[in-house]
Amino acid sequence: MNSPGIGLDLLLDLDGSILEQEGGYWINIEVQRIPMSRHAPHGIRYSLTLHDRYGARVLGYDNAHAVKPPKKFKFAGQRLPYDHRHRTASDKGVPYVFESAHRLLEDFFAEVDRVIKEAQQ
């Protein structure tokens, strides 16, 4: 497993970035260091989002709020995950396993490529 700090400097350097993508899509990246806590054991608050040409979020990875795991999993008495992803504009979020900042960037940009490619078909 990777250390949570791998790629952290790069991720922090991207804070405030807006990256234009093909087809009118664009990416917004917000990242801040915060004290490590139960909800953010990696010590960052982040929001990586993909928006369509009209500004609607179509994909997002963040840790702004807890998400309920799928009903098929029994999480009674366990903490709700804060790291999560929104797979569509209406998705309330599904848990995301944060391994490292580097892996977060890899996963997010792979999803961005997938979403844009599917939209162009």
Image (tube, grey):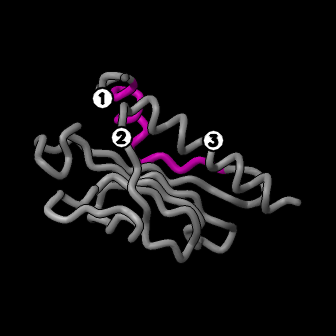
Does 38 appear above or below 73? above
For the residue labelled by badge 1, is the local secondary structure a helix, a strand or a loop? Answer: loop
**Label 1 close to label 3 by CB (< 8 Å):** no
Instruction: Give, as a three-letter code, the residue at label 1.
Output: Pro
Q: Which residue is mark 1?
A: 4
Q: Earlier in the sequence, mark 3 or mark 2?
A: 2
The image's mark for residue 110 is: 3
Q: Is 17 part of what is drawn in magenta?
A: yes
Using the image, tell me which numbered label, if any, was put on residue 98. Answer: 2
- Looking at marks 1 and 2 on the same chain, the residue that comes earlier in the sequence is marked by 1
Q: Closest to the observer: 20 or 48?
A: 48
121 in relation to 96, above or below: below
The kind of secondary structure element at disc 3 is helix
Quarter the C terminus occupies:
bottom right
Task: Name the side, left or right, on which 85 lies relative to 110.
Answer: left
Question: In the displayed structure, does residue 11 sit left or right of residue 37?
Answer: right
The location of residue 71, given as percent across then percent down, is 39, 71
Q: CA distance from mark 3 to mark 2?
A: 15 Å
Look at the numbered discs 1 and 2 and tell me whether their residues touch, using CB distance below 8 Å.
Answer: yes
Q: Which span of residues is magenta-colored?
A: 7-20
Location of residue 23 in the rendering, given as x and y in whole percent from the top left corner:
78, 58
Q: Residues within 10 Å of mark 1 (few under 14, many from 20)?
A: some
